[in-house]
Image: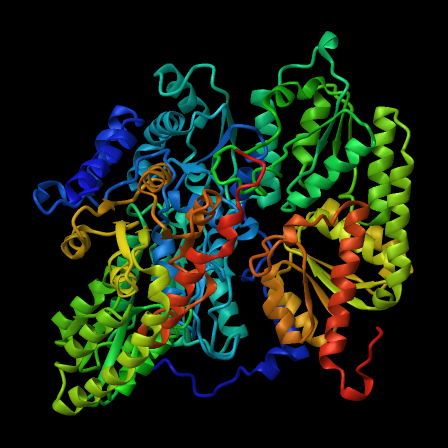
Amino acid sequence: MINMKATTKATTAWLNSEEYKTLNFAREKLVINPAKACQPLGALLCALGIENCLPFTHGSQGCTAYFRSTLSRHFREPVAAVSDSMTEDSAVFGGQMNLIEGLRNAYALYKPEVIAVFTSCMAEVMGDDINSYVGLAKHGDAIPKDLPVALGHTPSFKGSHITGYDTMFKALLEVLATPREADKLNDRLYVVPGFDTYPGNLREYKRVLKLMNAPFTLLPDNSDVVDAPNLGTYQLYPGGTPMTEVKDALNAKSFLFLQSYTSMTSSKYVASKEVSTETIPMPIGIKGMDQFIQAVAKSTGLEVPDEITNERGRAVDAMTDAHQYIHGKRFSLFGDPDLLIGLVSFLLEMGGLPVHIVCTNSTTPFKKAMEALLETSPYGKDATLYANKDLWHLRSLLVTEPVDMLIGDSHGKWAARDANIPLVRIGFPITDRVNLHRSPIVGYTGVINLISMIANTFLDDVDRNSPEATFEMMR
Amino acid sequence: MSIKETKEFRKQVVKDVLDIYPEKAKKNREKHIAVKDDDDCAGCAVKSNAKTVPGVMTARGCAYAGAKGVVWGPVKDIVHISHGPVGCGFYSWGNRRNLADGEIGVDNFVPFLFTSDFQESDIIYGGDKKLEKIIREVVELFPNAKGVSVLSECPVGLIGDDIESVARRMSEEFEMPVIPVRCEGFRGISQSLGHHIANDAIRDHLLGKGPGREVGPYDIGLIGDYNIGGDAWVSKKLLEECGLNVVNIWTGDSTMEMLQNGHLVKLNLIHCTRSMNYIVKHMEETYGTPWLEFNFFGPTKIKESLLKIAAKFDDSIMEKTLKVIEKYEGQMAKVIESYKPRLAGKTVMLYIGGLRPRHMVGSYEDLGMEVIGTGYEFAHKEDYEVTVADLKDGTLIYDDVTAFELEEFVQKLKPDLVGSGIKEKYVFEKMGIPFRQMHSWDYSGPYQGYEGFPIFAKDMDMAINSPTWKIIKAPWTK
């Protein structure tokens, strides 16, 4: 067969052209470089936030190897999770034996207090009845009868990692939280961080809640699991929300969800149990964090201490100090819906201009929320949300309608390089820089960190690219 | 401890570790673990290439990982479609260091993820129409792509899609290879079947179907080298210094034409036999192309291999090869001289894939280090046969070791260094044990050839002797 084409058509110049952009945006089915992972990865991350909880994939073992590798590369931490290693014969006979034997062995080895079972594609295509299999496992003494086993249906062909997180969270509450009882109510505010790959963010929430003197539970809280100290020993379960507090969740004073699109199902579930709930946008930027503080103050009835007001003041001071480096600069961003709402809101506060906003796992409610946010500011008028587009679309945008900076995870590095602009790494996964996940991007502290990352990256570029004549001491 | 005591101790360690398993799992796992015993090696042959026990933490991946991640992914001028839901493609995107040289999006598609991003409707109605449309869009957006491979993920096989007929139709219409690869993750029991399926797809769709070429007297192919961190490039350079002409690499930095012409060489050299023995055997049987296994890790094995390779050619090659060896042996002696004082006597435990659990042993020994435990994720019987023969008396051997077992073995045997993968790395670092990723070279490399060995030595020294290990304990803790 002759497989060489008569002419060589593609060139980098052509890839950078308007003509190519039109072709690229006309594609209907092919997805190239999507900024989304799949549901079970989110389910796994959620399960890591519960004390002594073992994440367990019901499906092919390759899935689990992929989730663990991907999470370990981002956090640079061990990620413990098991699989029941379904193979071709499970495709014929179902995954019952794998699930039962898997539960038996996992329990014997790792003695979890709860097992978070979530499915990958194979089990869902086959329609495995995992609920009854778990019943059989308990009946046959593979695992103790009173061992809680949460069940999340999380095939890769629905939603994305953020919906998987949501599904698993609801499943964990269903199996662990005892019913709400009027005489057993607690005084705690339950704060749900959502799919957050910054243990630094979780620690920041806890720090601020302590400053507020608020009785609270962060649920789930994987900060000590994906950012565990090196004390010379390896611990399989180094942290997580304490089981007693998980069990008591539905007796909460109220629930505060810090992300909207990772909690669509679980927040409804909690509300359906007569628990007062509030969902606010991810607290990135001053207004975002103000909303968080106000929500905490409102639900707990506490006064905001001066220390918080001063923290806010320091963040605002950092913004005014650095506004000249960000105001009027053009930005492209990609990532998860909640992250994008927060980051765009922050840029608008700084006078930065979001231009291209790419969200592969966009939904209609998110699209509306983003468009409403952009409407609120004159700095949002040049922005376009590219819903359900990917990073190859983004590349076309960057090379035809240039911007000054790209904000997104490590996958953005090729597009940024092709457009010759800096990439500030925010999101998941970040596999080519160290420690970024340890510094919060939320809260007033996060405001200062974001300014440092963005402004200093611009300034590093100025210094590296200045001719001698304009190479100056002060910037 | 005497060697006898060492062996007794290690056998007891194995026994203790196995005791925690439920009966059925224990019976299974005990066949996969052994202590090499020169006095009585009846039990040295570990069981391998068998199903993983459900519910344990295995490092193994799946057939898709073997076919897409290992074999097909590095071929740079073909567009590889991860066909099915988004996850598998996402997790295997940019996560293997198979470097490739070319213009990205023009004639190099390695840094991409192409996915059909299956939704629920595709599961219900099938994905064949979608696949056809996707291939049309690939051709339009990437007209220089020499071909398209379709790498199936689990649902494709379960819903009964006929990707073969779509591929055939598209191949005829666009007059280029469109290659269906049935590497659904549930097939087989590890990455290994994925390698085999990928080899078969090369055999059926590309090999012998290219433009052909004249075979020069010194033309050779480099098979089973995925150019991790540039490994294939340094091996190619070294072989060319010896007067040989590397015309094909499979599949690191390779092209479709290299796959089509794989048999058109005087000799195929194979590094990773596990993933590509199928195709070299096929080329020998069908085209009479001979093949030879070699090992380019560490100066001792490099020398042995170069001499073995040169012996297959005329005297001019042997003459050049001897000069090359002489030239580099001096340099290598200096490398060893500078690192050995800090590394001699240090012990290592390995747990890796493909060829490295045995191929790397020599490079550690060149530095005066001792491998006291080793094992493979997805080896077969023949791999262990050649491995065990090469290992020292008393070496612990573990197949498809579970995370639980490896953690226990390391804590009991107390090696100075563990070499394994990303999933294992941080567990051992938390224990305060030096670690190097031996799949990705921990983002360093190349490690192969005379060019790679000094980098390997520097990295092992850095890992073992990093001052960071000494400050783990706070001065006020007991």
Count of numbered marks: 0
Residue B162 placement (x, y as % from top left): 36, 55
Given residues B72 and A230, the one toward you in this image is A230
* Residue B326 sits above or below residue A436 on the image: below
Residue B189 placement (x, y as % from top left): 29, 45
Residue occupying image coordinates x 48% and y 86%: A8
Given residues B125 and B376, the one toward you in this image is B376
Q: Quadrant of the C terminus of chain A?
A: bottom right
> Residue farthest to the bottom?
B316
Residue B474 placement (x, y as % from top left): 57, 41
Query: Residue A272's image quarter?
Result: top right
Residue occupying image coordinates x 46% and y 69%: B110
Q: Is residue A333 left or right of residue B240?
A: right
Query: Residue A267's image quarter?
Result: top right
Residue occupying image coordinates x 61% and y 40%: A163
Q: Is residue B406 left or right of residue A389?
A: left
Q: Is residue B231 visible?
A: no
Q: Is residue B350 visible?
A: yes
> Residue farthest to the top?
A183
* Residue A197 sits above or below residue B236 on the image: above
